[in-house]
Image: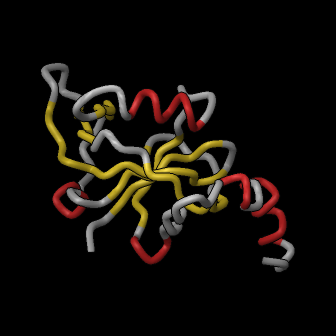
Amino acid sequence: MPLSMTKIAYRSKSIDSLRAWVEAGDEAHMRTRYRPTRHAEMIGGSLYWIMDHAIVARCEILGFEQRKDGHWTIRLAPRLVLVQPKHKRAHQGWRYLEERNAPRDLEEGEEPSDAIPGRLAGRLTKLGLI
């Protein structure tokens, strides 16, 4: 199973704005300072996007390319897949995500608003209620 990663969608105000950016061309490019050590395991995995303290969507990772400025480009498939929102604390940069810990994709017709918001889910989890 490919390895995935999480990243905060800090420039996107909504899932719609994230979708517009991801699906604008043949593939989406995200810049990062360092290439993940386990990058070979990540091709075919997903980059999971965090918004408002919850993982909300994912894009398939197509590959990694070094830039002239020494940074790296993460090449992403131009398709945003909504997932069952899952509480995730904010963090800088990216973090690895094992497949067993990844949220499931939403079914056709299922809406992310049907789920508990990320912050509330986090509080309920701390209380042992979910």
Most foreground residue, 8 or 14: 14
Q: Is there any visible trace of residue 38 in the rendered image?
A: no
Query: The C terminus is located in which quarter?
Result: bottom right
Q: x and y percent of residue 78 in the render?
A: 31, 39
Residue at 56%, 33% (x, y): give it. 16
Q: Position of residue 35 (x, y in %)?
A: 24, 44
**Would you say 60 lies left or right of 68 here?**
right
The vertical placement of 23 against 56, above or below, is above
Image coordinates of residue 103 in percent, x first then y, are 53, 67
Give the residue furthest to the top.
69
Is 64 on the left-hand or right-hand side of 11? left
Q: Is residue 2 left or right of residue 104?
A: left
Classify residue 127 by image quadrant: bottom right
Question: Residue 51: x, y in percent?
Answer: 62, 43
Q: Is residue 20 above or below residue 102?
A: above
Residue at point 28%, 27% (across, down) = 25
Which residue is drawn at the image coordinates 35% and 56% (left, top)? 46
